[in-house]
Image (spheres, helix red, strand yellow):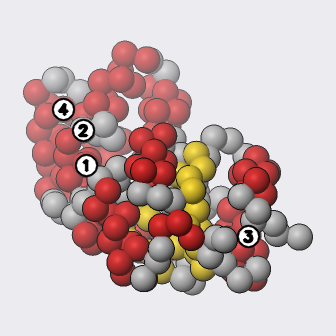
Amino acid sequence: MYKNVIFDIGGVMVDFDPKDFLLERFCNAAVEEKVYRLTFGSETWQKLDAGLCSRYEGSQAMLAAARAEGCAFEVQEVLENWTSILRIRRRMVELVRRLKNHGYCVYYLSNIPEDILPLLMRRGLEGVFDGGVASCDVHINKPDPRIYQCLLDKYGLTAGECIFIDDSRANVQTAFQLGMNSIQMRDSVDTLVRSLATCNVTLR
């Protein structure tokens, strides 16, 4: 029944837990919440994901907001070091390759800034997927249904033949509403493999 498996990148293929990163950095929940709001949780970050501003423009906007709240030093430190949390999940890469070996087409659908996708490709995602759509290229972020449709149209995919995997409940719900089978990635690769098995995707 299923021919295609679509993966989110951050939080699925790659470690991405900014709140843990901030708590380890500052060891202070109040500071973590403020810095998160000014960086990862900001409207500017959404614009970066959508390719609507450059990294320089985004950083300057976030620093200006941080200066107004008296935490420019903390935000500057985050902006300089946050990419260290983007670690490729090797077991996920192996899972994608197993799926390809079993005849499935594999794609990515990710909210990701234009400077981060090539970075992750260099770190180990190059050649892993059959294709994909990045938010920065189409200027639309998940869970907007239009970005899912961009992927379907680009590769001529039928929603009912796709399984979509994402760590965000909202993103998974949109995929389901569009007719895809959807799995929310919660913890381990082993759990994901078991979820795939319930969709009759076996990798033996």
Q: Residue 140: x, y in percent?
A: 25, 60
Query: Marks 2/4: CA distance?
Result: 11 Å
Q: Image point 66% across, 71% down: which residue?
A: 1
Q: Earlier in the sequence, mark 2 or mark 4?
A: 2
Q: Which residue does the numbered mark 4 point to in the structure image?
A: 66
The numbered disc on residue 42 is 2
Q: Please state which amino acid type lies under the numbered disc 3.
A: Glu
Q: Image point 82% across, 69% down: which residue?
A: 203
Q: Which residue does the numbered mark 1 point to in the structure image?
A: 46
Q: Which residue does the numbered mark 3 point to in the structure image?
A: 94
Residue depth check, mark 1 versus mark 4: number of the one nearer the observer: 1
Q: Please state which amino acid type lies under the numbered disc 1.
A: Gln
Q: Residue 185: x, y in percent?
A: 61, 47
Label 4 element class: helix
Query: Marks 2/3: CA distance?
Result: 33 Å
Q: Image point 73% across, 51% down: which residue?
A: 195
Depth check: 140 or 173 in front? 173
Q: Kindly indicate whether the residue at mark 1 contacts the one at mark 2 (C-beta within 8 angstroms).
A: yes
Q: Kindly indicate whether the residue at mark 4 contacts the one at mark 3 (C-beta within 8 angstroms).
A: no
Query: Marks 3/1: CA distance?
Result: 30 Å
Q: In this view, does 179 lie to the left or right of 150?
A: right
Whether residue 52 is visible, yes or no, is yes
Depth check: 22 or 192 in front? 192
- Which quadrant would residue 196 be assigned to in this image? bottom right
Query: Marks 3/4: CA distance?
Result: 40 Å
Depth check: 97 or 152 in front? 152
Compared to residue 56, the image places residue 97 above or below, namely below
Q: Kindly indicate whether the residue at mark 3 contacts the one at mark 2 (C-beta within 8 angstroms).
A: no
The numbered disc on residue 109 is none
Q: Residue 101: x, y in percent?
A: 75, 82
